[in-house]
Structure formats: structure tokens, C-alpha cells
Image: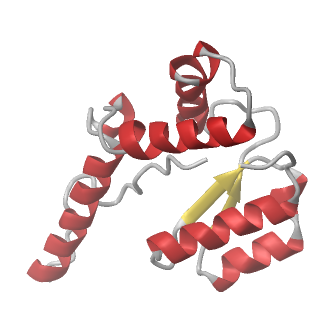
Amino acid sequence: MAAHMRKELVLEALQMAVERRRPAKGVIHHSDHGSQYTALLFTGRCQQAGIEVSMGSIGDCFDNAVSESFHASLKKELIHRRPWPTRAEARSAIFEYIEGWFNPRRRHSTLGYLSPADYEQAHHEALAATKLDGAGVTPEGADKAPAACSP
């Protein structure tokens, strides 16, 4: 969390995500057309990490509905409920909301009423089962990427 939206912010977030999650090749990073996401350095780092870059249509609020829903929930359930005297307090509360509540416990209709963590676990289990049976048949839901719920 920073006081700016420059490319350095998204580069640091990308690096943190890659180091923490170690995504498989072909993961998709979807964003708007903000200059920080269209910067050659950012798209190059995505390419180095095997991450495909996807950008929504200009003016189309529906292509990123899951992300928009997350931000609406964050604002309604946390941000707008109290004042935030310091950036550090807000950052800490947002981290706790995402890592302590939203990802592990909050259920989502988009994910079949599973939490993001439970959906991701089921996704990985389905992929592992597919690899074990060797049939090449994808179990239901295994072809869907888990929702990313990090700021």
C-alpha cells in the first residue's frame, strides 16, 4: 500500500506475489489500462515469470466484476466503517481483513459458495487428481483459475 500508483508499486506487488505464490506458467494477470500495468517493465516482468497479461475493454465494468465486487466488499465491510488516522493502521487492517477473513473464510457465489482459500485448495486437488489418473480429463471446476484477492 502506497501513496502513489506508479509502476514501482505494481512491480513490487508482482514480485511479492511471484515469490510468495510461485504461480505456474500461464497464470493470467487481468487489469485495467492504467499506465503502471501497460509499462514495458511490468509486462516484461510478467513475461519473465510466465504470467500472461490481460487487459479489460475500456469502459467495460463487467469484464472485471469479481475484482470490482472484492473492492466494494472491502470498502463496505471495513474501510467506510471508521476513520483511519494513519496509513499504517489502514494497511494493517486491510491485511487482516484479506488474510484473516476474506481469503480463508468469506464465501463467494462466484466460487460456488466456497472461500477463495477453499476454492483454490479444491482446484489444486482436482489438478492433482487429473495428473494421477493420467486420463487427461479435467474434473469439473479444475479449469477455472482461483480468484486472486490481494490488493
Q: 144 or 34, which lies in front? A: 34
**50 sits to left or right of 146:** right
Q: Report the colour scheme.
A: secondary structure
The residue shown at (78%, 49%) is 2
Is residue 67 visible from the viewing direction of this image? yes
User: Would residue 63 be seen by someone viewing this image from the given angle?
Assistant: no
Q: Residue furthest top?
A: 81
From the top left corner, tell me how far across and down residue 45 is, in percent.
Answer: 73, 78
82 vs 108, left or right, is: right
- Asked if 43 appears above or below 108 in the picture, the reply is below
| Quarter where residue 54 is shown | bottom right
Residue 146 screen position, x and y as percent? 40, 53
Of residues 1 and 46, the one drawn nearer to the viewer in this rendering: 1
Q: Quadrant of residue 42?
A: bottom right
| Figure check: 113 above or below 136 | above
In the image: residue 123, left or right of residue 46: left
Is 93 situated left or right of 141 in this image?
A: right
Above/below status of 48 relative to 97: below
- Identity of the residue drawn at 65% across and 67% down: 14
Residue sitting at 75 percent across and 68 percent down?
A: 11
Between 102 and 57, which is closer to the camera in this rendering?
102
Residue 79 in the image: above or below residue 149: above
Residue 65, percent from left and from top = 58, 33
Q: Residue at x 37, y 55 (%)?
A: 144
Q: Which x, y percent locates residue 123?
A: 27, 59
Count of numbered tags: 0
Q: In the current view of this chain or complex, which residue is farthest to the left?
A: 133
